[in-house]
Image (spheres, grey):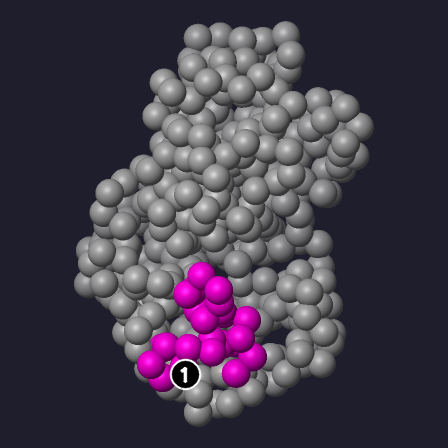
Amino acid sequence: MSHWPGKFVIGLTGNIGTGKTVVRRMLEHLGAYTVDADALSHRAIAKGAPGYGPVVDLFGKWILDKNGEIDRAKLGTLVFRDPAAMQQLETIVHPLVRQAVEVLGRRATQPVVVIEAIKLLEGDLRKGCDSIWVTYAPQVVQIERLTRKRGISREEALQRIHAQAPQESKLEAADVVIRNIGSYDDLWKQVTQAWKKNIPVGTAPLPAPREVKAGEFTVTRGKPKDAGAIAGLINRLSKGEHNLTADNIMAQFGDKAYMLLDSGRRLVGIAGWQVENLVVRTTDVYVEPDIDAALALETLVREIEKVSSDLQCEASLVFFPTSLPSQDGVWKKLGYEGRSPHGLGVQAWTDAAKESMPADTRLYFKQLRQDRVLRPI
């Protein structure tokens, strides 16, 4: 990646269940452009993508689900048990992922690019990295995370852990080791300190708070220091549905970001959102009942779109509570359409909607860019 002029490239890796994705999102909070190479590998074998036919030809149609998509659970069960099958799969997928990473890295405007990949050290992606960061967690923590977050058995978790090279081999190659064994607050401090220490001076200072004014409102991106205020507003406006603490919000900073809406130094609105696999998903929307809800919603969504465009997102999904007035005029003005998850037309967008859509919400969709990452592949 050294042929990307003016960019400092971090290669982020670590074994399964050690918290790579959380660290990647924290680096995104600090101003980096981040690429999830493992998510790109999923896109590369989606129906219609260039890896789909070769993978089906290799493993057979039994790996397909009822919609003709590759069932990644079936495929994963096979390749984690058979190293030769894993190598055959990687021979198909890895060149496609490298091409996609090249496209995204070249288009990125941010001076720091982070590439997250579980097989970073074993492939060509390593060659272009200026610094290797490795996440670490003890095996007992890996097992707990895999069984809790992925719903797999302890035996299957151990099988996946043992299918990978020992963590020590990655630690030996690391320029930075992030030990993900404590609280999210501790993890955030490690990541921030590593950023300050390892990013070359002048390349990418910690970003200054960005404030955007719209009428009576000011919108800013939430920081960990705002965790208490965010929890308080959500608890009050959810009318007992949530009872969050500042620690809960700190933990969620590993999954999402927050846009905060202020009016006269009073927090009056929040939108929680995340970017994953080039799709922005806005899953939490709360506004005070005594403000202009239409203007508040428009202000929050426009700023989320701006940040998401900087992250090269292809599509925006907003999950709006059915308990609130539908605000049809706002959605029309912003260019959104009401859709169902199955009516989005691109498998990655459908998957994003199905993964993220909370109960009792409506889905509003907008395509943010025409040049999708799979086109160049």
Q: For the image shown, how many numbered marks are present on the structure?
A: 1
Residue positioned 53% across, 63% down in the render: 20
**Which quadrant is the N terminus positioned in?**
bottom left
Residue identifier under label 1:
59
Observer-nearest of 128 and 343: 343
Secondary structure found at label 1 = helix
Q: Is residue 94 left or right of residue 293?
A: left
Residue 112: x and y in percent read 35, 52
**Please, is residue 307 above or below residue 143 in the view?**
above
- Which of the 4 image quarters holds residue 104? bottom left
Q: Is residue 333 left or right of residue 14?
A: left
Verify whether residue 177 appears in magenta. no
**Which quadrant is the C terminus positioned in?**
bottom left
**Please, is residue 109 above or below residue 5 in the view?**
above
Q: Amino acid at mark 1?
A: Phe
- Which of the 4 image quarters holds residue 288? top right
User: Which span is picked out in magenta?
Assistant: 55-78
